[in-house]
Amino acid sequence: MIFFGFVLAVIGLIHWYFWLRLVRDTTTRRRWRWIGGVAIAVPAVLLVITPIIEPMVTPRAGWLTAPGYTWIGVMFYLLLGLLAVDTVLLVARLARWGVGLLRRRRSTLREVPVAAREAVPASVGGAGNPVPPVPPRSTPPAPAAGSSDPDGPANPSRRQLLRRGLALAVGVATVGVAGYGVVRAYGPLTVKRVPVPLARLDRRADGLRIALISDLHVGPLYGADQVRRVVETVNGLDADLVALVGDLTSSEAGAVRAHATPLRQLRSRYGAYFVTGNHEYYTGVEEWLAEAEELGLRVLRNERVEIAHRGGAIDLAGVNDQEGSRYDDPPDYAAALGDRDPTRPVVLLAHQPVQVHQAAAYGVDLQLSGHTHGGQLVPFNAVVRLDQPAVSGLATVDGTRLYVTNGAGFWGPPMRVGAPPEVTLIELRSA
């Protein structure tokens, strides 16, 4: 309840800020302020109730959740835009204040005090040349309303016109970015081919290909059509095996089972393998593990299998997501990685990149992960980087190679900006 109250407070403050900048500062009539207030309050309410009603929404009624989740992305970029504009205006105001202060100081230093000049005796100028009296300085009249004097008060109508223009510019930019994000989220998948050299890989197994999928988040907004597109993309890669590294869903199995059925059509030489992500635990892990088996996915639950390829072999291991520790189903690295042949390389499937620290202690050659979505909405990737050793792409952590995929789906807002949906083909190479 404390966390929920905190979230409500943050949402309320953000939308109050929107009202200040987009309504109060741009309108004067009470009627328009009421209309603007309602226009901002409605999406705020939708944002709060959408996660609550989502479990009750049937796949065909998934559109009911679209406005609330879409508003999350719009709100994010609208907030960034307004904060950026306000920061620029604040800097400009401080700069103008500083310039005005400097001008006044220089003017004061150049002036001779009037009292001193009036005190000079007439004889100083000689009998025939008395020093003329210096007239006192008159105070210049205050600039009239609408004056262009930079030191005078700004024209209220001009200020309001500026605020309207800035609000319109931020709104148009936000809609443009959000629209692009929606199109990108539902658009073509990016296929990345990533060669990864492994020192212990037998030369006979050189070229073993792993199709990596993550974070489908099957649910009301990511249904059978999108899953079918992922399957067709993977099948077109002719991979030796398929690895699905968690977050298959964001909903309960019974609600979206039909959406996941295209996964049965996945094709590969050595099968498709699956490990849990954090969202499986939020939506009923046992039901989803049973569903994964029904879909033809081999679940690696803190275990490993041998993959023989052209006379060579690798160990393919999988551990539960670390969120499983809260549900009495934690990752067990010793069970998955202990007592194995040290001459064979091991590839570990683990949902979160941060699990690489434990994996490295067991000499894992390569860990394949997802979870981050590549940040999903730039610049949110910078925030994700605070919690994970890598956000997207290939990295080396504690001597272990780590590849983090952007994932194919999305979570929350149906948008992707700066982190395109991805299917990756990992090609193992003998070093």
Image (cartoon, rainbow, N blue to C red):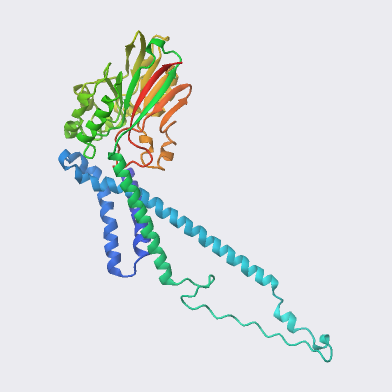
Above or below, 144 against 353 in this view is: below
Residue 365 appears in which quarter of the rendering? top left
Of residue 307 and residue 309, the one placed in the foreground of this image is 309
Question: From the image, which quarter does the N terminus lie in?
Answer: top left
| Residue 178 as seen in the image, left or right of residue 356 | left
Report x, y in % for residue 347. Answer: 38, 18
Residue, far bottom: 128
Image mark count: 0
- Which residue is located at x 60 percent, y 66 percent? 101
- Which residue is located at x 44 percent, y 40 percent? 382
Report x, y in % for residue 380. Answer: 40, 41
- Which residue is located at x 29 percent, y 49 percent? 71
* Residue 5 visible: no
Above or below, 37 against 54 in this view is: below
Residue 319 appears in which quarter of the rendering? top left
Residue 85 appears in which quarter of the rendering? bottom left
* Residue 164 visible: yes
Report x, y in % for residue 22. Answer: 35, 60
- Which residue is located at x 34 percent, y 59 percent? 19
Of residue 7 and residue 278, the one placed in the foreground of this image is 278
Above or below, 218 against 142 in this view is: above
